[in-house]
Amino acid sequence: MNSYRETDAHQRAKWAILNGCAQAGYTPQSEVIGGDWRADVLAARGGVRVAFEVQWSPQKLRETLLRQERYARDGVRGCWFFRQPPSALRAAEDPAARRDLPLFHLFANADGSFVVRLSGRLTPLGSFVAALLGGQVRFCEEAVSTEAQEAAFEFYPLRCDACGRVGHVHRLKPPILARCGHRAALDQDWALFATRGELLTAAHQAAANDPALTLARFSEVGGGASAACPHCGAAYPERRIALAGYGEQPVRTLTAEVRLRRPLRLRSAHWCFPVEGEPCCPPGG
């Protein structure tokens, strides 16, 4: 907290957190002072203590981490609700997830209540706090996709060194919908998905009605993939495949419905909060 005098909004947000802590079976207190920290709300149960901070004004990531370290030093876990997340953590949707810094985007409603946005879903602040303390919100390094996906494919041209004709390679375009609602990036080599049967079929279906697209022939090689010219069958050099589309716009971006036989597992750190079913990782994952 930046000053002793609080806005009404800040006070209402604290009340919502206090209620959420009580719902989860914790004993909460407001404005608890430590050696060199003051928590908006400190929740305790057994030997576990969790500090909640409502950051109403902008605060740099460096300052936030410093304050988080003070909590950790004293055996207190810290959780932050930011109206304006630090610029260093800003991403397309949610603040970039860090295991050492539970930090979430807070919004005020017109009626004076508050919601937390996570994975495109809005949850009342008190309910979110109760879910977090109850283990329903957890940090996952990996995202597990839903079986049903509306897959978007980007198509890039490659000219064959052997016959001189142009074929096309495809890439699966992010984001991929995870089962918790998180939209995951694709940081793996695109080739890991190029020969996945249902995805390859979906790419061909997407391109089927476009006479300008002629898809390369893909095959699996040592856990990766190779591609060959669709006209003469000559193999494309691996480097050219890897660089296809680098710094270029795709000639087409098309979508197709696909049902995955098994989920994609993607390296995509996020705070996982499934609406129903299992999260993307086990406890402590």
Image (cartoon, rainbow, N blue to C red):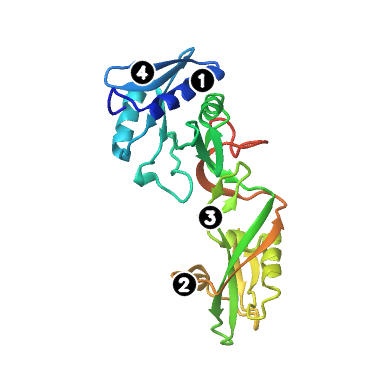
Q: Depth check: give the residue in front, 20 or 210.
A: 20
Tag 2: amino acid: Glu
Pick whichever of labels 1 and 3 is earlier in the sequence: 1
Residue 239 is marked as none
Q: Position of residue 251 (x, y in %)?
A: 55, 75
State the CA–CA distance, disc 1 to disc 4.
Answer: 15 Å
Q: Position of residue 243 (x, y in %)?
A: 48, 70
Q: Number of callouts in the render?
A: 4
Residue 35 relative to residue 114: left or right: left
Pick whichever of labels 2 and 4 is earlier in the sequence: 4
Pick whichever of labels 3 and 4 is earlier in the sequence: 4
Q: Position of residue 165 (x, y in %)?
A: 59, 85
Tag 1: amino acid: Asn
Pick whichever of labels 2 and 1 is earlier in the sequence: 1
* Mark 2 crowd level (few <14, some 14–19, many ≥20, 10 Å Cα): few
Tag 3: amino acid: Leu
Residue under pointer 3:
186
The quarter of the rendered structure image containing the N terminus is: top left
Residue 19 is marked as 1
Pick whichever of labels 3 and 2 is earlier in the sequence: 3
Residue under pointer 2:
248
Q: Depth check: give the residue in front, 189 or 108.
A: 108
Residue under pointer 4:
31
Q: Write the residue at 36% across / 34% down.
A: 56
Q: Write the residue at 40% across / 38% down.
A: 83
State the CA–CA distance, disc 2 to disc 4.
Answer: 54 Å
Q: Write the residue at 60% across / 46% down.
A: 178
Residue 13 relative to residue 279: left or right: left
State the CA–CA distance, disc 2 to disc 1.
Answer: 52 Å
